[in-house]
Image (cartoon, grey):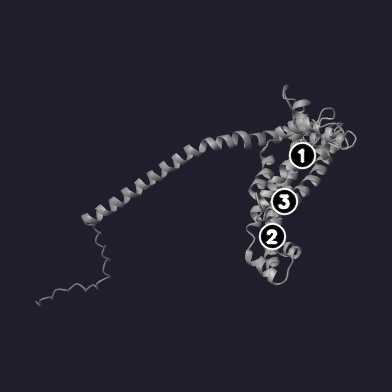
Amino acid sequence: MSKTTPRTAPRQRPGPAAPRRPAPLTLSDHDQERSYEHARRLRARRRRARGETATAWAFVSPSILVILGLSVVPVIWSLLLSFRADDLVTPSRWVGLANYRALKEDPHFSQAVRNTLEYTALYVPLSMLLGLALALALNRRIKLVGLYRTLIFVPFVISATAQGVLFSFILDPQFGAANSVLHSLGISQQGFLTDPGQALLVLVAISLWSGTGFCVVVYLAALQDVPQSLIEAARLDGAGRRQLLRHVVLPTLTPVNVFLLLWQIINSLQVFDLVYVTTKGGPLGSTTVIVYFIWEQAFKNFTAGYGAAAAYVLALVLLVIGVGLRLLRRRGPAGLEGATR
């Protein structure tokens, strides 16, 4: 009987080796300590930043509350009020755009707008021209120039209320010093603030007496910044005083002119104190300006919603003027660069 040979199992091919897992990285004690110290410093820095932020808000919050309470909230409240009929006593009611439509047909509002525009058209250019002329005269080395500059600027510091009281006494038709001087010169007595044909012009003159000083100071500062190299170069080219003023000085004053124009327009459109103290809108409404009209409607006639609508018409006009002059001022450097080449 033959012996059977044992059957050998077939050889299996080795499969792909299983990927070895990377050995976990272990930080040394020194690295762990550095990482912990970095995290601790980061947390301390964040706590310090939060503390500084809280301290800053603690200092700023009173000012923010004042701004919100005296500026933002009244603006929003008056905007809503302009769409309501409100006498500040009884409950108000919603009227929509009725207040604005009534303004369009109100002859008293139209008269206030005309008076304000006339006042602005007279005061703004005259104050700037007088300010520039006085600044050019005082931008020289003359004796007692500091005293002259101070005397011109002092009226600007006096409040409009004090100016109104002062000129009410001076221009009084019966006992004022102005008529006494005119009488001594052989000129007939004038009504001044009591004459409908003169009252607005007198207010313009009073405003010029006080407001020109600000223009003088601004122009003086601008004139002292005119590059002397341009002036000397123009003189070497044979330019006289007029050519020097026209082609060198005035182009460099363009940004200042735009600023003063915007400043004076805003002030003239918001004139109130002087009118309230001197004429109270009279005589016969000849000096009723927009702001006085707003005050009269809100606190004298007790039509607060109507007055608020007039106030927002004025605010819209001021916004348009401000945006327009700002766009004009942006174009100023290009024109200035071209003028000084």
Q: In this orientation, which residue lies closer to the viewer: 71 or 242?
A: 242
Whether pointer 2 and pointer 3 mark residues with C-beta atoms closer than 8 Å, the reply is no
Q: Name the N-terminal-most of marks 3 and 1.
A: 3
Q: Quadrant of the C terminus?
A: bottom right
From mark 2 to mark 3, how far is it between C-alphas?
A: 24 Å
Please tell me which of labels 2 and 3 falls first in the chain: 3
Q: Which residue corresponds to mark 3? A: 134
Give the residue number, with chain letter if any, for mark 2. 332
- Asked if residue 219 can be seen in this view, the reply is yes
The label nearer to you, 3 versus 1, is: 3
Question: Label 3 amino acid?
Answer: Leu
Q: Residue at x 73, y 61 (%)?
A: 245
Specify few, some or many for label 1: CA neighbours under 10 Å numbering under 14, 14-19, or 20 or more: some
Q: Quadrant of the N terminus?
A: bottom left
Disc 1 or disc 2, which is closer to the eye? 1
**Along the polypeptide, which appears first: circle 1 or circle 2?**
1
Quadrant in the picture for residue 192: top right
* Label 3 neighbour load within 10 Å: few <14, some 14-19, many 20+: many
Q: Amino acid at mark 2?
A: Gly
Q: Amino acid at mark 1?
A: Ile
Q: What residue sits 76% from the left and 63% below the top?
A: 242
84 to the left or right of 333: right
Point 71% across, 61% down: residue: 251
Q: Which residue is mark 1?
A: 206
Residue placed at 63% from the left, 37% from the top? 71
Q: Percent from the top left, x then y, of residue 56?
A: 46, 41
